[in-house]
Image (cartoon, helix red, strand yellow):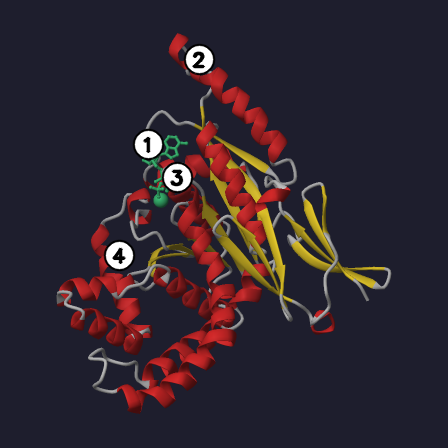
Amino acid sequence: MRIILYTGKGGVGKTSVTAATGLRLAALGHRTLVMSIDPAHSLADAFDMDRTLMDHGGGKPVRIRENLDMQEILIQQEVKRHWASVYDYVTKMLHVSGIDEVVADELAIFPGMEEICSLLYINQYVREETYDVVLVDCAPTGESLRFISIPTTLDWYMSKVFKLERRVMKVARPLLKGVAGVPLPEDDMFVNIETLFNSLRGIDSVLRDAEMTTVRLVTNPEKMVLKETQRAFMYFCLYGLTVDAVIINRILPDDADGEFMDAWRKTQQGYLENIEEFFASVPIWRVPMFRGEVLGTEGLERLGDALYGDEDPSPPNTSEAPMSFTKDGDDTLLRMKLPFVRAAEIDLSAFNDELVVQIGNFKRHVSLPRNLVGVKPGKARRDGDVLEIAFPA
Ligand SMILES: Nc1ncnc2c1ncn2[C@@H]1O[C@H](COP(=O)(O)OP(=O)(O)OP(=O)(O)O)[C@@H](O)[C@H]1O
Ligand SMILES: [Mg+2]
Protein backbone atom coordinates (compact mmCIF):
# COMPACT_ATOMS: atom_id res chain seq x y z
CA MET A 1 0.00 0.00 0.00
CA ARG A 2 1.08 3.58 -0.63
CA ILE A 3 0.34 6.48 1.71
CA ILE A 4 0.87 10.00 0.45
CA LEU A 5 0.48 12.98 2.76
CA TYR A 6 -0.26 16.38 1.23
CA THR A 7 0.57 19.37 3.33
CA GLY A 8 1.60 23.01 3.11
CA LYS A 9 0.68 26.45 4.33
CA GLY A 10 -2.99 27.40 4.62
CA GLY A 11 -4.74 27.97 1.31
CA VAL A 12 -1.91 26.85 -1.02
CA GLY A 13 -4.06 24.19 -2.71
CA LYS A 14 -3.59 21.01 -0.63
CA THR A 15 -7.19 19.88 -0.85
CA SER A 16 -7.42 20.56 -4.61
CA VAL A 17 -4.20 18.65 -5.27
CA THR A 18 -5.26 15.71 -3.07
CA ALA A 19 -8.67 15.48 -4.74
CA ALA A 20 -7.18 15.77 -8.25
CA THR A 21 -4.66 13.04 -7.43
CA GLY A 22 -7.47 10.83 -6.11
CA LEU A 23 -9.38 11.15 -9.38
CA ARG A 24 -6.29 10.38 -11.42
CA LEU A 25 -5.36 7.28 -9.38
CA ALA A 26 -8.91 5.93 -9.43
CA ALA A 27 -9.04 6.37 -13.21
CA LEU A 28 -5.79 4.39 -13.46
CA GLY A 29 -7.47 1.53 -11.58
CA HIS A 30 -5.87 1.93 -8.15
CA ARG A 31 -8.20 1.35 -5.21
CA THR A 32 -7.88 4.82 -3.74
CA LEU A 33 -8.98 6.55 -0.56
CA VAL A 34 -8.82 10.31 -0.09
CA MET A 35 -8.92 11.09 3.60
CA SER A 36 -9.31 14.48 5.21
CA ILE A 37 -7.89 15.04 8.66
CA ASP A 38 -8.29 18.81 8.56
CA PRO A 39 -11.16 19.51 10.97
CA ALA A 40 -12.27 22.13 8.45
CA HIS A 41 -13.17 19.40 5.96
CA SER A 42 -13.33 20.67 2.42
CA LEU A 43 -12.73 17.61 0.25
CA ALA A 44 -16.43 17.28 -0.56
CA ASP A 45 -16.42 20.94 -1.61
CA ALA A 46 -13.48 20.38 -3.93
CA PHE A 47 -15.44 17.59 -5.60
CA ASP A 48 -18.41 19.99 -5.59
CA MET A 49 -20.44 17.25 -3.93
CA ASP A 50 -23.58 17.29 -1.92
CA ARG A 51 -22.49 17.28 1.74
CA THR A 52 -25.34 15.03 2.83
CA LEU A 53 -23.63 12.03 1.22
CA MET A 54 -20.63 12.55 3.52
CA ASP A 55 -22.86 13.18 6.52
CA HIS A 56 -24.52 9.82 5.91
CA GLY A 57 -21.09 8.23 5.93
CA GLY A 58 -20.73 9.21 9.60
CA GLY A 59 -16.97 9.62 9.34
CA LYS A 60 -16.42 6.30 7.53
CA PRO A 61 -15.26 5.96 3.91
CA VAL A 62 -17.92 6.77 1.33
CA ARG A 63 -17.71 5.48 -2.26
CA ILE A 64 -17.84 8.49 -4.60
CA ARG A 65 -16.97 6.78 -7.87
CA GLU A 66 -15.39 3.59 -9.15
CA ASN A 67 -12.17 2.91 -7.19
CA LEU A 68 -12.50 6.10 -5.20
CA ASP A 69 -13.58 6.42 -1.57
CA MET A 70 -13.58 9.55 0.50
CA GLN A 71 -13.36 9.79 4.28
CA GLU A 72 -13.70 12.78 6.55
CA ILE A 73 -12.77 11.98 10.14
CA LEU A 74 -15.46 13.09 12.58
CA ILE A 75 -13.59 13.66 15.74
CA GLN A 76 -16.43 13.66 18.31
CA GLN A 77 -17.58 10.23 17.21
CA GLU A 78 -14.09 8.83 16.94
CA VAL A 79 -13.18 10.00 20.39
CA LYS A 80 -16.24 8.33 21.86
CA ARG A 81 -15.40 5.13 20.00
CA HIS A 82 -11.72 4.86 20.89
CA TRP A 83 -11.22 6.95 23.95
CA ALA A 84 -14.36 6.31 25.96
CA SER A 85 -12.73 6.04 29.40
CA VAL A 86 -10.12 8.71 28.81
CA TYR A 87 -12.82 11.01 27.55
CA ASP A 88 -15.12 10.23 30.49
CA TYR A 89 -12.39 10.88 32.96
CA VAL A 90 -11.30 14.19 31.45
CA THR A 91 -14.88 15.44 31.10
CA LYS A 92 -15.60 14.50 34.71
CA MET A 93 -12.48 16.27 35.87
CA LEU A 94 -13.24 19.42 33.90
CA HIS A 95 -16.79 19.35 35.14
CA VAL A 96 -15.84 19.19 38.82
CA SER A 97 -13.44 22.06 38.16
CA GLY A 98 -16.56 24.12 37.53
CA ILE A 99 -16.63 23.96 33.76
CA ASP A 100 -19.98 23.68 32.08
CA GLU A 101 -20.75 20.16 30.85
CA VAL A 102 -21.12 21.16 27.22
CA VAL A 103 -17.84 23.06 27.25
CA ALA A 104 -16.15 20.19 29.13
CA ASP A 105 -17.31 17.88 26.32
CA GLU A 106 -15.51 20.07 23.81
CA LEU A 107 -12.41 20.56 25.90
CA ALA A 108 -11.97 16.86 26.53
CA ILE A 109 -10.91 16.50 22.92
CA PHE A 110 -7.20 17.07 23.12
CA PRO A 111 -5.18 18.57 20.34
CA GLY A 112 -3.79 15.70 18.35
CA MET A 113 -6.75 13.35 18.71
CA GLU A 114 -7.85 13.83 15.09
CA GLU A 115 -4.43 12.85 14.03
CA ILE A 116 -4.37 9.79 16.26
CA CYS A 117 -7.73 8.69 14.89
CA SER A 118 -6.61 8.97 11.32
CA LEU A 119 -3.45 7.07 12.18
CA LEU A 120 -5.64 4.31 13.64
CA TYR A 121 -7.54 4.11 10.36
CA ILE A 122 -4.40 4.17 8.27
CA ASN A 123 -2.92 1.37 10.35
CA GLN A 124 -6.10 -0.64 9.92
CA TYR A 125 -6.07 -0.13 6.12
CA VAL A 126 -2.45 -1.20 5.98
CA ARG A 127 -3.17 -4.36 7.98
CA GLU A 128 -6.30 -5.24 6.00
CA GLU A 129 -4.89 -4.13 2.63
CA THR A 130 -8.12 -2.27 1.93
CA TYR A 131 -6.61 0.20 -0.55
CA ASP A 132 -3.74 0.48 -2.99
CA VAL A 133 -3.24 4.15 -2.20
CA VAL A 134 -4.36 6.36 0.68
CA LEU A 135 -4.06 10.10 0.09
CA VAL A 136 -4.21 12.25 3.19
CA ASP A 137 -5.33 15.87 2.94
CA CYS A 138 -3.61 17.30 6.00
CA ALA A 139 -4.32 20.42 7.97
CA PRO A 140 -1.94 23.34 7.37
CA THR A 141 1.70 22.64 8.11
CA GLY A 142 1.94 23.22 11.86
CA GLU A 143 -0.76 20.74 12.63
CA SER A 144 0.41 18.09 10.23
CA LEU A 145 3.72 18.11 12.03
CA ARG A 146 1.87 17.21 15.17
CA PHE A 147 0.38 14.35 13.19
CA ILE A 148 3.70 12.78 12.41
CA SER A 149 5.31 13.46 15.76
CA ILE A 150 2.56 11.53 17.56
CA PRO A 151 3.83 7.96 17.09
CA THR A 152 7.27 8.77 18.47
CA THR A 153 5.86 10.83 21.31
CA LEU A 154 3.36 8.11 22.22
CA ASP A 155 6.01 5.46 22.08
CA TRP A 156 8.14 7.50 24.41
CA TYR A 157 5.24 8.22 26.74
CA MET A 158 4.20 4.58 26.95
CA SER A 159 7.66 3.30 27.65
CA LYS A 160 8.79 6.04 30.04
CA VAL A 161 5.76 7.55 31.76
CA PHE A 162 2.73 5.35 31.34
CA LYS A 163 3.86 2.32 33.30
CA LEU A 164 5.03 4.47 36.16
CA GLU A 165 1.85 6.53 36.26
CA ARG A 166 -0.35 3.47 36.27
CA ARG A 167 1.62 1.91 39.11
CA VAL A 168 1.47 5.11 41.12
CA MET A 169 -2.29 5.38 40.61
CA LYS A 170 -2.79 1.78 41.72
CA VAL A 171 -1.15 2.59 45.04
CA ALA A 172 -2.49 6.09 45.44
CA ARG A 173 -6.13 5.58 44.45
CA PRO A 174 -7.34 3.99 47.72
CA LEU A 175 -5.46 6.59 49.73
CA LEU A 176 -6.62 9.61 47.79
CA LYS A 177 -10.20 8.64 47.02
CA GLY A 178 -12.54 11.29 48.34
CA VAL A 179 -9.71 13.39 49.74
CA ALA A 180 -8.80 15.55 46.83
CA GLY A 181 -12.35 16.15 45.60
CA VAL A 182 -11.10 15.51 42.10
CA PRO A 183 -11.94 12.22 40.42
CA LEU A 184 -8.96 9.94 39.99
CA PRO A 185 -8.51 7.97 36.81
CA GLU A 186 -9.71 4.39 37.15
CA ASP A 187 -7.58 1.58 35.83
CA ASP A 188 -10.06 1.38 32.93
CA MET A 189 -8.57 4.51 31.56
CA PHE A 190 -5.13 2.99 31.48
CA VAL A 191 -6.49 -0.12 29.80
CA ASN A 192 -8.13 2.16 27.24
CA ILE A 193 -4.87 3.95 26.50
CA GLU A 194 -3.03 0.67 26.28
CA THR A 195 -5.54 -0.77 23.80
CA LEU A 196 -5.24 2.34 21.69
CA PHE A 197 -1.52 2.18 21.80
CA ASN A 198 -1.63 -1.44 20.66
CA SER A 199 -3.80 -0.50 17.69
CA LEU A 200 -1.22 2.08 16.73
CA ARG A 201 1.64 -0.39 16.99
CA GLY A 202 3.58 -0.52 13.76
CA ILE A 203 2.36 2.82 12.40
CA ASP A 204 5.72 4.33 13.19
CA SER A 205 7.52 2.02 10.81
CA VAL A 206 4.75 2.48 8.22
CA LEU A 207 5.30 6.24 8.27
CA ARG A 208 9.08 5.91 8.16
CA ASP A 209 9.15 3.39 5.32
CA ALA A 210 10.03 5.56 2.34
CA GLU A 211 8.67 2.99 -0.10
CA MET A 212 5.31 3.09 1.59
CA THR A 213 4.82 6.60 2.95
CA THR A 214 5.95 9.87 1.45
CA VAL A 215 5.06 13.51 1.93
CA ARG A 216 4.34 15.92 -0.92
CA LEU A 217 4.65 19.56 -0.01
CA VAL A 218 2.32 21.95 -1.77
CA THR A 219 3.64 25.47 -2.14
CA ASN A 220 3.12 28.74 -4.01
CA PRO A 221 5.81 30.99 -5.50
CA GLU A 222 5.64 33.51 -2.64
CA LYS A 223 8.17 34.39 0.01
CA MET A 224 6.21 33.49 3.15
CA VAL A 225 4.93 30.25 1.68
CA LEU A 226 8.38 29.27 0.51
CA LYS A 227 9.86 29.85 3.97
CA GLU A 228 7.23 27.64 5.55
CA THR A 229 7.84 24.96 2.93
CA GLN A 230 11.52 24.88 3.85
CA ARG A 231 10.75 24.58 7.55
CA ALA A 232 8.21 21.84 6.89
CA PHE A 233 10.71 19.93 4.75
CA MET A 234 13.22 20.06 7.57
CA TYR A 235 10.75 19.00 10.27
CA PHE A 236 9.51 16.05 8.23
CA CYS A 237 13.14 14.98 7.92
CA LEU A 238 13.55 15.36 11.66
CA TYR A 239 10.72 12.90 12.25
CA GLY A 240 12.07 10.50 9.67
CA LEU A 241 9.44 11.00 6.97
CA THR A 242 10.48 11.18 3.35
CA VAL A 243 9.48 14.19 1.29
CA ASP A 244 9.41 12.95 -2.31
CA ALA A 245 7.98 15.91 -4.24
CA VAL A 246 7.32 19.61 -4.03
CA ILE A 247 4.26 20.87 -5.90
CA ILE A 248 4.26 24.51 -6.89
CA ASN A 249 0.67 25.63 -7.35
CA ARG A 250 -0.78 28.86 -8.76
CA ILE A 251 1.99 29.79 -11.19
CA LEU A 252 0.78 32.68 -13.35
CA PRO A 253 0.56 31.57 -16.99
CA ASP A 254 2.21 33.55 -19.79
CA ASP A 255 -1.12 34.63 -21.19
CA ALA A 256 -2.04 36.44 -17.98
CA ASP A 257 -1.07 39.81 -19.46
CA GLY A 258 -1.14 43.47 -18.55
CA GLU A 259 1.29 45.52 -16.50
CA PHE A 260 -0.21 44.39 -13.22
CA MET A 261 0.19 40.70 -14.07
CA ASP A 262 3.68 41.25 -15.48
CA ALA A 263 4.81 42.60 -12.13
CA TRP A 264 3.38 39.56 -10.36
CA ARG A 265 4.93 37.19 -12.85
CA LYS A 266 8.33 38.73 -12.36
CA THR A 267 8.03 38.32 -8.59
CA GLN A 268 6.95 34.71 -9.00
CA GLN A 269 9.85 34.06 -11.40
CA GLY A 270 12.36 34.91 -8.67
CA TYR A 271 10.74 32.53 -6.20
CA LEU A 272 10.41 29.78 -8.81
CA GLU A 273 14.17 29.91 -9.28
CA ASN A 274 14.65 29.75 -5.50
CA ILE A 275 12.36 26.73 -5.27
CA GLU A 276 14.24 24.91 -8.04
CA GLU A 277 17.49 25.55 -6.21
CA PHE A 278 16.35 24.80 -2.64
CA PHE A 279 14.48 21.60 -3.39
CA ALA A 280 16.77 20.25 -6.10
CA SER A 281 16.96 16.90 -4.24
CA VAL A 282 13.32 16.05 -5.07
CA PRO A 283 11.11 16.27 -8.17
CA ILE A 284 9.32 19.61 -8.47
CA TRP A 285 5.92 19.61 -10.14
CA ARG A 286 4.20 22.74 -11.40
CA VAL A 287 0.57 23.76 -11.65
CA PRO A 288 -0.58 26.99 -13.30
CA MET A 289 -3.10 29.37 -11.84
CA PHE A 290 -6.40 28.61 -13.56
CA ARG A 291 -8.89 31.22 -14.66
CA GLY A 292 -11.41 30.24 -12.03
CA GLU A 293 -11.54 28.11 -8.91
CA VAL A 294 -10.71 24.44 -9.28
CA LEU A 295 -14.00 22.77 -8.55
CA GLY A 296 -15.77 19.54 -9.44
CA THR A 297 -14.55 16.61 -11.49
CA GLU A 298 -13.79 18.64 -14.58
CA GLY A 299 -11.70 21.27 -12.78
CA LEU A 300 -9.86 18.66 -10.75
CA GLU A 301 -9.09 16.57 -13.82
CA ARG A 302 -7.64 19.64 -15.49
CA LEU A 303 -5.46 20.19 -12.45
CA GLY A 304 -4.41 16.51 -12.52
CA ASP A 305 -3.45 16.78 -16.21
CA ALA A 306 -1.37 19.89 -15.56
CA LEU A 307 0.34 18.21 -12.62
CA TYR A 308 1.02 14.74 -13.92
CA GLY A 309 0.65 14.75 -17.73
CA ASP A 310 0.26 11.06 -18.56
CA GLU A 311 2.13 9.84 -15.51
CA ASP A 312 0.92 7.68 -12.64
CA PRO A 313 1.76 9.73 -9.53
CA SER A 314 1.53 6.86 -7.05
CA PRO A 315 5.08 5.40 -6.98
CA PRO A 316 7.50 7.01 -4.54
CA ASN A 317 10.11 9.23 -6.18
CA THR A 318 12.88 8.19 -3.84
CA SER A 319 13.55 5.34 -1.48
CA GLU A 320 16.08 7.16 0.61
CA ALA A 321 14.94 7.67 4.20
CA PRO A 322 16.18 10.86 5.90
CA MET A 323 17.74 9.01 8.82
CA SER A 324 20.06 6.02 8.82
CA PHE A 325 22.69 4.25 10.84
CA THR A 326 25.75 3.30 8.81
CA LYS A 327 29.12 1.76 9.58
CA ASP A 328 32.26 3.89 9.44
CA GLY A 329 35.11 1.45 10.09
CA ASP A 330 34.35 0.12 13.55
CA ASP A 331 32.31 3.16 14.49
CA THR A 332 28.61 3.60 13.82
CA LEU A 333 27.41 6.79 12.16
CA LEU A 334 23.95 8.20 12.64
CA ARG A 335 23.13 10.32 9.61
CA MET A 336 20.15 12.67 9.66
CA LYS A 337 19.19 14.79 6.69
CA LEU A 338 18.31 18.21 8.15
CA PRO A 339 18.24 20.88 5.45
CA PHE A 340 17.49 24.59 5.91
CA VAL A 341 18.54 24.73 9.54
CA ARG A 342 21.56 26.35 11.14
CA ALA A 343 23.80 24.16 13.29
CA ALA A 344 23.17 26.52 16.22
CA GLU A 345 19.46 25.72 16.09
CA ILE A 346 20.01 22.01 16.64
CA ASP A 347 20.12 20.90 20.23
CA LEU A 348 21.39 17.39 20.92
CA SER A 349 21.32 15.41 24.13
CA ALA A 350 22.19 11.77 24.60
CA PHE A 351 20.66 9.52 27.21
CA ASN A 352 21.27 5.89 27.85
CA ASP A 353 19.14 4.40 25.08
CA GLU A 354 18.07 7.41 23.11
CA LEU A 355 19.28 10.54 21.46
CA VAL A 356 17.10 13.63 21.67
CA VAL A 357 17.29 16.03 18.76
CA GLN A 358 15.49 19.30 19.35
CA ILE A 359 14.91 22.04 16.81
CA GLY A 360 12.69 24.90 17.98
CA ASN A 361 9.69 23.42 19.73
CA PHE A 362 10.03 20.07 18.03
CA LYS A 363 11.77 17.21 19.71
CA ARG A 364 12.58 13.83 18.25
CA HIS A 365 13.53 10.91 20.49
CA VAL A 366 15.71 8.61 18.42
CA SER A 367 15.86 5.16 19.96
CA LEU A 368 19.34 3.77 19.67
CA PRO A 369 20.00 0.25 18.43
CA ARG A 370 20.93 -2.16 21.20
CA ASN A 371 24.67 -2.14 20.43
CA LEU A 372 24.77 1.64 20.93
CA VAL A 373 22.96 1.79 24.25
CA GLY A 374 25.18 3.50 26.80
CA VAL A 375 27.79 4.48 24.17
CA LYS A 376 28.81 8.12 24.50
CA PRO A 377 28.44 9.75 21.08
CA GLY A 378 31.24 11.84 19.63
CA LYS A 379 30.87 15.43 18.47
CA ALA A 380 28.21 16.04 15.83
CA ARG A 381 29.31 17.43 12.48
CA ARG A 382 27.56 18.73 9.40
CA ASP A 383 28.14 17.33 5.94
CA GLY A 384 26.07 19.60 3.68
CA ASP A 385 22.44 19.02 4.65
CA VAL A 386 23.32 15.98 6.72
CA LEU A 387 24.02 15.90 10.44
CA GLU A 388 26.45 13.14 11.38
CA ILE A 389 26.93 11.75 14.84
CA ALA A 390 29.61 9.13 15.40
CA PHE A 391 29.27 6.42 18.05
CA PRO A 392 32.72 4.98 18.75
CA ALA A 393 33.08 1.19 18.89
N1 LIG B 1 -4.12 26.30 -9.51
C1 LIG B 1 -5.22 26.92 -9.09
N2 LIG B 1 -5.84 27.85 -9.86
C2 LIG B 1 -6.95 28.49 -9.42
N3 LIG B 1 -7.55 28.25 -8.25
C3 LIG B 1 -6.98 27.35 -7.43
C4 LIG B 1 -5.79 26.63 -7.79
N4 LIG B 1 -5.49 25.78 -6.81
C5 LIG B 1 -6.42 25.95 -5.84
N5 LIG B 1 -7.32 26.90 -6.21
C6 LIG B 1 -8.48 27.39 -5.44
O1 LIG B 1 -7.97 28.00 -4.26
C7 LIG B 1 -8.82 27.74 -3.16
C8 LIG B 1 -8.03 27.07 -2.04
O2 LIG B 1 -7.60 25.79 -2.46
P1 LIG B 1 -7.58 24.54 -1.49
O3 LIG B 1 -8.83 24.47 -0.70
O4 LIG B 1 -7.20 23.36 -2.31
O5 LIG B 1 -6.36 24.96 -0.56
P2 LIG B 1 -5.91 24.30 0.83
O6 LIG B 1 -4.42 24.40 0.87
O7 LIG B 1 -6.52 22.97 0.98
O8 LIG B 1 -6.56 25.31 1.87
P3 LIG B 1 -6.74 25.08 3.46
O9 LIG B 1 -5.39 25.38 4.08
O10 LIG B 1 -7.77 26.10 3.82
O11 LIG B 1 -7.17 23.67 3.67
C9 LIG B 1 -9.96 26.88 -3.68
O12 LIG B 1 -11.03 27.72 -3.96
C10 LIG B 1 -9.41 26.29 -4.97
O13 LIG B 1 -10.43 26.04 -5.92
MG1 LIG C 1 -7.70 22.14 2.58
Of the numbered discs 4 and 1, the one sitting upstream in the chain is 4
Callout 4 touching callout 3 (CB < 8 Å): no
The residue tagged with tag 1: helix, strand or loop?
Answer: loop
**Around disc 2, counting alpha carbons within 10 Å, would you say few (fewer than 14), some (14 to 19), or many (20 or more)?**
few
* Above or below for 225 versus 371: above
**Quarter occupied by the N terminus:** bottom right
Residue 170 image-quadrant placement = bottom left
The residue tagged with tag 2: helix, strand or loop?
Answer: helix
| Quarter of the image where ligand 2 sits | top left
User: Which numbered disc, 1 or 2, marks the residue closer to the eye?
Assistant: 2
Mark 1 CB near ligand 1 (8 Å cut): yes
* Above or below for 228 versus 379: above
Q: CA distance from mark 4 to mark 1?
A: 22 Å
Amino acid carrying mark 2 in the image: Ala
Q: Which residue is mark 4?
A: 54
Of the numbered discs 1 and 2, the one sitting upstream in the chain is 2
The residue tagged with tag 3: helix, strand or loop?
Answer: helix
Q: Which residue is mark 3?
A: 300
Q: CA distance from mark 3 to mark 1?
A: 10 Å
Amino acid carrying mark 1 in the image: Glu
Q: Which residue is mark 1?
A: 293
- Depth check, front residue: 236 or 101: 101
Residue drawn where x is 55% and y is 39% of the image: 310
